[in-house]
Image: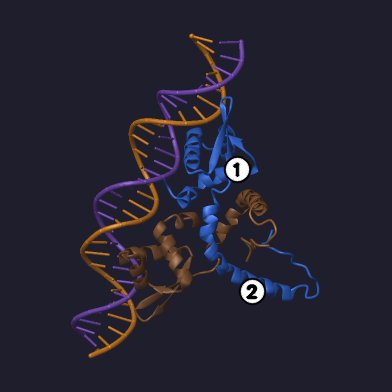
Chain colours: A brown, B blue, C orange, D purple
Amino acid sequence: MPSVFEIIAEPNRRAILGLLIASEQSVGEIERQLRMPQPAVSKHLRVLRDAGFVEASVDAQRRLYRLKPDSLQAVDEWLAPFRRFWTAQVDALERHLDRMDQPEEKKRPARRGK
Amino acid sequence: MPSVFEIIAEPNRRAILGLLIASEQSVGEIERQLRMPQPAVSKHLRVLRDAGFVEASVDAQRRLYRLKPDSLQAVDEWLAPFRRFWTAQVDALERHLDRMDQPEEKKRPARRGK
DNA sequence: CAAGCATATTCCATTTGAGACATATTACGC
DNA sequence: GCGTAATATGTCTCAAATGGAATATGCTTG
């Protein structure tokens, strides 16, 4: 049972997850979009399923895979303590830029919010 | 040149990064805190340094390693599109809880916002 | 400059995991 | 039930990366 981090270390698995953001996809659709041999797709999906990142429903002979919520939350939580590290930098940069270009306008809407 | 994701896939490297959140540390300090052979520490630090996650300054014979900002930002950006996936879930749960316990109080302050 | 400590590097053995291909399974239409 | 499409699994090989032990480098002090 590999860790969450090992799961997403594999580029093809990240690609598959990326596809599933849009909507659920069959194995064949993934295979075509990523131009990847079918056994490879199935194997990666197996790993993702075992790790709880995706789930499948049966539609005749196809299996439709979709993202499971929560799966990537663990990564987000691990990241949290580090986040303040770069936000300090970015905030300073933004203040700097704000002072530079249009000192009068109220531009530059919420960059990280929502 | 491994990807950001491969860098943080290694548990010991995550542990080292975790230590450096608190403050900069020498190799020896990391070695002792993580109970890890010194060459292992140096090797992982090498990888982290090459990947731009940490930087070192020289203090006599010791090298003090500290986090570089921005390094983990790439992970955060990759995570962004997925984030809305679980927030939908969490928000629903929060609304549910809010309805349950104190229906009158204005408690439960911003949980994810800074 | 010799000795000693802190860190880096090299070498080797082992393991892990992905890729490629062949093959098994399962469901459908006829 | 047969043939076929869609997906899963098994096997083999190979590359990469980790751990461990020995060794090299570098700085410092006496």
Could you say which is closer to the camera, residue B52 or residue A74?
A: B52
Q: Residue at x 58, y 54 (%)?
A: A78
- Earlier residue among tags 1 and 2: 1
The type of residue carrying mark 2 is Ala
Coordinates of residue B38 in the picture (x, y in percent): 51, 33
Could you say which is closer to the camera, residue B101 or residue D25?
A: D25
Q: Are marks 1 and 2 in contact (CB under 8 Å)?
A: no
Coordinates of residue B81 in the picture (x, y in percent): 53, 65
Coordinates of residue A16 in the picture (x, y in percent): 42, 65
Instruction: Give the secondary structure at mark 2.
Output: helix
Q: Can residue A1 be seen at all in this image of the molecule?
A: no
Q: Residue furthest right?
A: B104
The type of residue carrying mark 1 is Leu
Q: Taking A77 as reference, is B51 left or right?
A: left
User: Dot 2 surroundings within 10 Å: few (below 14), some, or many (20 or more)?
Assistant: few
Pointer 1 residue: B19
Chain of the residue that carries numbered disc 2 in the rendered image: B
Q: Can residue A12 be seen at all in this image of the molecule?
A: yes
Q: Residue at x 36, y 72 (%)?
A: A29
Could you say which is closer to the camera, residue C1 or residue C24?
A: C1
Instruction: Give the secondary structure at mark 1.
Output: helix
Question: Can you say whether B21 is above or below D7 in the image?
Answer: above
Kindly report the distance in space between the C-alpha atoms of the residues bearing marks 1 and 2: 35 Å
Chain of the residue that carries numbered disc 1 in the rendered image: B
Q: Residue at x 60, y 68 (%)?
A: B87
Pointer 2 residue: B92
Question: Can you say whether B54 is above or below D30 in the image?
Answer: below
**Quadrant into which the C terminus of chain B falls:** bottom right
Q: Residue at x 60, y 42 (%)?
A: B20
Instruction: Give the label on residue A71, or none.
Output: none
Residue at mark 1 shares a chain with residue at mark 2: yes
Coordinates of residue A3 in the picture (x, y in percent): 49, 55
